[in-house]
Image (cartoon, grey):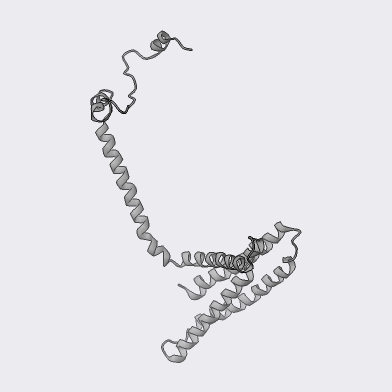
Amino acid sequence: MVDAPKAAAGRQVGAPAPYKPCTGCICSGRAAAPRRRALGENPFQDAVRGELTSKVRLCFTLKRVAHWPHMLTNRYVIALVVPVVLILSSAFARKLVRGSPWVRSDFFLGVQLSLAAIAAALTNFLDLSKAAAAGTAQIDANSLAKNGAFLAICFFLLLVVLATHQEWENKIQTPTAQFWWLGAFCNVIGAGLLVAFIILVKGI
């Protein structure tokens, strides 16, 4: 243990002891203000600084909330949210229908995502044709060409996904490779088709 005289000698002569606020006595609250001013502290400036900091944080929070509606109409946000929602919804639907605990195959949704992209492209093609037939809109050759090319690409990539599933669906003895091929590779193809349709074909 350090002796009291040595500890007192170790402190700088004339330097006030650091302020330690206490509770439950006359030193707390307003009674401590003179002592804090004597030590070079200003409790009122601290309070104002804390209040300004709270107002700045509230202002930034309100600005972030105000930008949420614009984010919901942003085509890139929609293009990212739609595949994720479809993957999670399909996985939950598979689990609920099966009535058993989660398995890896619940998230192997490359086929479903690819079919969803094909269905979206066919629906868009029918909408364009219907509007042109009714005379409410002119036939846009560029839109029809993009839609047709997208359908061809979707059909080819769907065959790739189906072939990959046929190759790896029953290889449960290699779970890591199965997950990378079916849970990552095929899902990326299906989700990429949906993103491409939203951004490039539909053009939200």
Q: Nearer the viewer, residue 96 or 41?
A: 96
Taking the spot 30% from the left edge, 28% from the top edge, the residue there is 24
Taking the spot 23% from the left edge, 25% from the top edge, the residue there is 34
Taking the spot 59% from the left edge, 66% from the top edge, the residue there is 96
Extreme residue toward the front, this view: 99
Picture coordinates of residue 21, whole percent (x, y)? 32, 27
Q: Nearer the viewer, residue 32 or 157?
A: 32
Extreme residue toward the top, this view: 5
Picture coordinates of residue 165, whole percent (x, y)? 70, 69
Q: Nearer the viewer, residue 143 or 92?
A: 92
Q: Quadrant of the C terminus?
A: bottom left
In the figure, 107 relative to 49: above or below? Answer: below
Picture coordinates of residue 18, whole percent (x, y)? 34, 22
Answer left or right for 119 relative to 164: left
Give the image quarter of residue 13: top left
In the figure, 59 relative to 153: above or below? Answer: above
Answer left or right for 40 relative to 167: left
Answer left or right for 121 relative to 184: left
Answer left or right for 171 relative to 185: right
